[in-house]
Image (cartoon, helix red, strand yellow):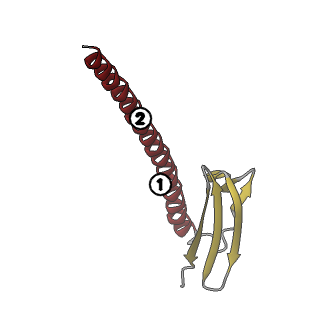
Amino acid sequence: MQTKRSFTLLEVLLSSIIGAILLYSGYSILFHLTQKEDFTYHQTITKLDFETTRHFLEYKIKNDSTLNSLQIRDQIVSYNNAPLIKNVTHFTKQIEQMGITIDICTDLNGEFCTQIYIKKETL
């Protein structure tokens, strides 16, 4: 009878330890997946911001061939004082003969950079 109680106690202890390990592992995996999902979400939003900015500037280059109204102030890239991209850490605009190259980096949960090339309209 004594050995049966000892064995039952040992089973309860081992089950508790295994259960605790499984709960901790599950929580850890869930935490890392949530963190990765948040990063992917913010990265996707940033990519969409860059893509919509590129389309907007492709439309605006028809009237403003040098994109003079495109400027950066207080880490915000704007066109005619309308904000396009926020949290900008690096911005360069290089006017070339056939188009304009714009390099933009943002810092939102890690730095993300892109290069936008906008071809000038030929008449």
In the image, what residue type sits under mark 2?
A: Ile
In the rendering, which numbered label is found on residue 21? 2
Distance from the alpha carbon under mark 2 to that under mark 1: 34 Å
Q: Nearer the viewer, residue 37 or 122?
A: 37
Q: How many residues crowd mark 2 within 10 Å: few (<14), some (14–19), many (20+)? A: few
Q: Quadrant of residue 101?
A: bottom right
In the image, what residue type sits under mark 1?
A: Thr
Above/below status of 24 relative to 77? above
* Foreground tag (2 vs 1): 2
Residue at image position (49%, 45%) is 38
In the current view of this chain or complex, which residue is farthest to the front? 2
Q: Quadrant of residue 63?
A: bottom right
Helix, strand or loop at disc 1?
helix
- Say whether disc 2 or disc 1 marks the residue closer to the N-terminus: 2
Residue at image position (47%, 44%) is 32
Describe residue 44's horizontal placement relative to residue 61 as left or right.
Answer: left
Whether residue 80 is visible here, answered yes or no, is no
Count of numbered labels shown in the rendering: 2
Above/below status of 83 relative to 100? above
Describe residue 21's horizontal placement relative to residue 2 as left or right.
Answer: right
In the rendering, which numbered label is found on residue 120? none
Q: Residue beneath label 1, please?
A: 44
